[in-house]
Image (tube, rainbow, N blue to C red):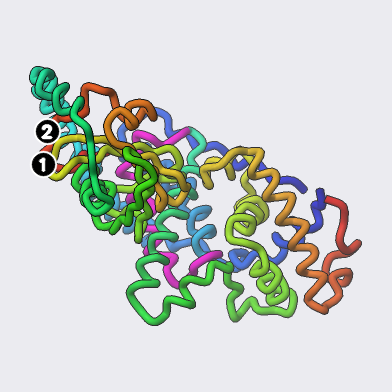
Amino acid sequence: MQCERPTRTGSGVGRPEERFTALYVEQLEAVRRYVWRREPAACDDVVAETFLVAWRRLETAPADARPWLIGIARNVLLNARRSARRRDALSRRLAARTPRIHADNASREAELVATALATLNEKDREVLLLCAWEQLDRAAIAKVLGCSMANVSVRLHRARRRLEAALADTGRAHQALIPGGSSDV
Amino acid sequence: MSDRTLTFLREHDPARTLAPLADNSREELRRMIVATTPIRQAHRLPRRLLAIGAVVVLLLGVVGAALAARELFKSPAEEERGLPAGSALFIGTDPTCTTVDDDQFHCTLESAPTVEYIEGSYLGAKMLTVDSTKHIDGGCIARSADGLAWDCYLGEAAVEHEILVRDLLGQYQPGPSHG
């Protein structure tokens, strides 16, 4: 399974409100999922702010709007985390950039995934999750992160290897979780 | 490259259980957003004013050239004040600058831009700076994707780094530039 190209969203022609509504309807859930995977407690606020920025910058929306919107959401999320770090005593919780596995989802395997993901550095983890969860291709990931496709490829390669090693290092049987165990990358 | 790792991660996607937003909530949010004024319209006036100001100041090119030709000296503290005074993007970012050379500083922002900010990477973004009399004296280039690290140049060095055109040097800029 490879990173997949998402469906294209036509920013196209039409009145701004119509264009925005089309973009909003098509991309809202994808953006919600992206934010919820990373900061469920702030999901509603971050999603609203993301689409507010998108509305204000609608003229610059590309035809394939998903990477653009996820890039905006990522910045909004980062800014929210920075503000939260300063503002309150919950900073450590908010600063943890590890995607959270929710209580109702906290199976043994889910815990294992969260623990293994936490061993990756932030950018490698983000590249891997943009590929696995958001199912963006490398070009789209490069747009989200503002880096080159070559850089994405290197990070993805490294992140996969490290994740597999981390899964194996947890003391649980990686083989039991991923049939076939670690593999060549 | 292993597809099993991606498959495994997708099987443990925490958003698999996330229910779609209810129709009424979705429509309410959409209405609230489109009821706001697009910021680009709000910014048109300052940009136009800035363009008019630039034309006016061009007519005073002799003065500008004279200011540009003078030798520029600036302390790190002056540069730190010159960032938000020159570009709105730096407002509220609390920059700290260190001298790299006679005409170069390295500046680090305490916090990411919020008054104005750039979607995606800041790398390569270029902003103007002013001196204590609000005359343009150089500019900065973002050196990190998160917009916290900037290299700033004075006078000709800023021109050489293609941050601004020579004619802009020494022009009076009463307020921070936008966009």
**B130 relative to B170, above or below:** below
Residue A134 part of the magenta-drawn span:
no
Contact (CB < 8 A) between labels 1 and 2? yes
Q: Quadrant of residue A149?
A: top right
Residue A75 in the image, given as x and y percentages of width and height: 43, 54
Question: Which residue shows up at 53% across the image and 41% down it?
Answer: A143
Can residue B136 be seen? yes
Question: Which residue shows up at 27% across the image and 55% down it?
Answer: B32
Give the residue number, with chain letter if any, for mark 2: B172
Q: Chain of mark 2?
A: B
Residue B83 in the image, given as x and y percentages of width and height: 25, 47
Residue B5 in the image, given as x and y percentages of width and height: 77, 58
Give the residue number, with chain letter if any, for mark 1: B133
Instruction: Please indicate whether residue B171 sits to the left or right of residue A80 in the image.
Output: left
Instruction: Please indicate whether residue A41 sits to the left or right of residue B88 in the image.
Output: right
**What residue type is disc 2 on?**
Tyr
Frontmost residue, B67 versus B159 = B67
Residue A54 part of the magenta-drawn span:
yes
Residue B136 in the image, given as x and y percentages of width and height: 19, 35
Distance in Å between CA atoms under marks 1 and 2: 8 Å
Magenta segment range?
A: A37-62
